[in-house]
Amino acid sequence: MPFRDVIEITAQGGRGGDGAMSFLRLKYIPKGGPDGGHGGHGGTVWLEAVDALNSLDALGHRRTYKAPSGNPGEGREKAGLAGGDLTLSVPVGTRVFDLDTGEQIGDLVEVGERLQVAAGGQGGRGNASFASSRRQAPRFSEAGSRGEQRRLRLELQTIGDVGLVGYPNAGKSSLLAAVSNARPRVADYPFTTLHPQLGVVEREGEGGAERLTMADIPGIIEDAHKGRGLGLDFLRHIARTRLLVYVLDVADDPVATLDALRVELEAYDADLLERPALVALNKVDLADADELAAAEAELTGFGMPVVRVSATAGTGLDDLVPALFALLPPRPEPIRAPAEERRVVVDPVRVERDTDGAWVVRGRELEAVVERFDAGNRDAVAYLQHHFAALGVNKLLKRAGAETGDDVRIGDAAFEYFDEDAGDDEAREHLRTDAADQRAAERRYLAQQRRSEGAGDADERADVEGEPDEEPADEGLDEGLEGGDVTEERSSP
Ligand SMILES: Nc1nc2c(ncn2[C@@H]2O[C@H](COP(=O)(O)OP(=O)(O)OP(=O)(O)O)[C@@H](O)[C@H]2O)c(=O)[nH]1
Ligand SMILES: [Mg+2]
């Protein structure tokens, strides 16, 4: 099975369920009030670090991971079921990057740690929640919003305390096997080890058992940074270690080897050379005393401790293990970004002119709101007006030179621009009539409801007669965008 420690996937939150458009129908109340319930929220995609994995293979088979959508709302104010969350297991040590921004959005270093990578969409509101004293029979509801979509790069960076670095065949895996609980493959040919291995080294200290983890990686050769051998990619797995052990074969020109290894490490990340390190001069069982003494003398010139060992004969391990514990720097406190350090997202609304003469209004927030309503539904468009006003859409259009009757596109929705200051009497009259019609219809509806309920409500009546209420202007007269064709009755937004 191929070992994958870097993968690219797309995480897609579930879509929110649509809000319902429904009116109560009972035997004796032929035209009851709006009772469309909310749609359920879409599921969220999470990553969770687990102990049982040591590669990203399991996630590499698919490109996109999508959480379930929320269910639509129903009549009688029944909310739709939320989509369940999708949790993807990753190995401990997985770093998560946003592929589009390059930004690191998380680093899962502990078992059980979770990271939200794509939020589910919001459920749409049912028409019941758009009812107000002036709009008692809203014939529209809100569509669920799309779930967040994020292209991700996952990079496994093994979490270990000590990293073994050396040429192929130097005896790194033999050493890991000799001092830890790991049983890696050992063989008399280069590149036996093809992916990182972790082992736990334990010793009895004064205060009880002490442990450290040791990472063995594939061998590195000269010019690995030019892609020779397995390249430098596996150095990623020692990047987090706090102590490096250069494993050198005493019979294989150890000084030149150490020089070459350090050149390769520097090419990957110069910081690696600053890290505490020691030399394990291996296979001493095969060397004669003079050869050993000469090698050791030269190696001390690098300024790090040199320990003579034989991984297979077990010599020197009693010196090596205490040296590891002694030289390992303490684990730094994890740096967590303070919660208040939130990013400020600037989302300006922009107006552009398309080649066909239509105005295109762009803005993430604006497009997201518009997307959730039916632009062909007059009630919905009237409701949208206060969003347009709040975001300055009409002013922007006017400043850009839009004229009454021009086409305006926001996302996939099309509107017609109406300049309320231009003195276009015809357009004004047109809208005024619509609004008046609507109010008359509402009045009839209310009167009917009052009759069926038997008693009237003073507040309600006052509102119908034109008292201002707390909602922003939403009847289309004072604002400049008008919806397309009016759809009289729709069962969904
Ligand atoms: N005589 C002797 N042989 C050793 C010693 N250490 C390792 N070997 C042998 O050297 C060969 C390579 O050992 P490995 O542990 O697989 O070497 P490695 O550095 O992990 O090699 P790669 O995984 O290919 O990079 C094996 O045949 C080992 O038995 C030692 O101290 N003395
Ligand atoms: Mg090996």
Image (cartoon, rainbow, N blue to C red):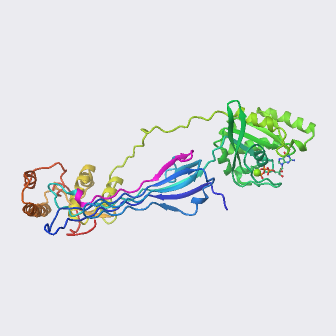
Q: Where does the image place residue 404, in percent across and percent down from the top left?
A: 20, 61
Image quarter where the C terminus lies is bottom left
Using the rendered view, name the quadrant where residue 446 is placed: bottom left
Q: Does the magenta run of residues contain 123?
A: yes
Residue at horizontal 10 percent and vertical 62 percent from the top: 449
In-image side of 319 versus 378 (left or right): right
- The answer to whether residue 403 shows anywhere in this view is no
Left-right relation of 422 to 79: left
Q: Position of residue 23 (x, y in %)?
A: 20, 65
Assign the N terminus to one quadrant of the image: bottom right
Indicate left or right for 469 with 288 as reference. Answer: left
Q: Which residues are magenta?
A: 106-129
For image coordinates 89% across by 43% down, the residue present is 285
Q: Residue at x 44, y 39 (%)?
A: 339
Residue 236 screen position, x and y as percent: 65, 47
In the image, 22: left or right of 257? left
In the picture, residue 262 is in which quadrant? Answer: top right
Q: Residue at x 59, y 35 (%)?
A: 332
